[in-house]
Amino acid sequence: MQELVQYIINGLVDDKDSVKVEVDGETVKVTVAKSDMGKIIGKQGRTAKAIRTVVRAAGAKDGKKYSVDILEV
């Protein structure tokens, strides 16, 4: 799951060095630079919602319910 989220997030941000993805149980914590927060959240939260949908669908294959927390540095 970590590799999937890392791949998606790296495609969206400019500062790839500040991206950290950690899986803690069924919570995926994504940390990005403050300047990239807008790109991750998107207009009206659509990008963040899409990321959460993809992660939930991928987790359903494993029988787990993942949630995504987006944090800034």
Image (tube, rainbow, N blue to C red):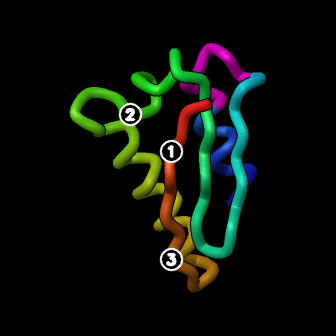
**In what quadrant of the picture does the N terminus appear?**
bottom right
Relative to 10, is 57 above or below? below
Q: Is residue 33 left or right of residue 38?
A: right
Q: Position of residue 73 (x, y in %)?
A: 62, 30
- Frontmost of labels 1 and 2 is 1
Q: Is residue 23 above or below residue 32?
A: below
Whether residue 7 appears in magenta in the rendering, the answer is: no
Asked if residue 37 is positioned above or below residue 20 in the image, the reply reads above
Q: Quick one: 21 or 2, which is closer to the camera?
A: 21
The reply to whether dot 1 and dot 2 touch (C-beta < 8 Å) is: yes
- Residue at the disc numbered 2: 41
Name the spot of residue 63 as percent of width and height, x first: 57, 85
Q: Give the residue pinned by disc 3.
A: 65
Q: Amino acid at mark 1?
A: Ile
Question: Dot 2 lies on which element?
Answer: helix
Which residues, given as a range, are shown in magenta? 10-16
Labelled disc at residue 70: 1
Q: Nearer the viewer, mark 1 or mark 3?
A: 1
Instruction: Give the spatial CA distance, label 1 vs label 3.
Output: 17 Å
**Looking at the image, which residue sits at the far left?**
44
On the image, the x and y values in percent for residue 24 come to 69, 67
Verify CB contact (< 8 Å) between mark 3 and mark 2: no
Amino acid, disc 2: Ile
Q: Earlier in the sequence, mark 1 or mark 2?
A: 2
User: Residue 31: where, in percent of width, then height?
Assistant: 62, 39
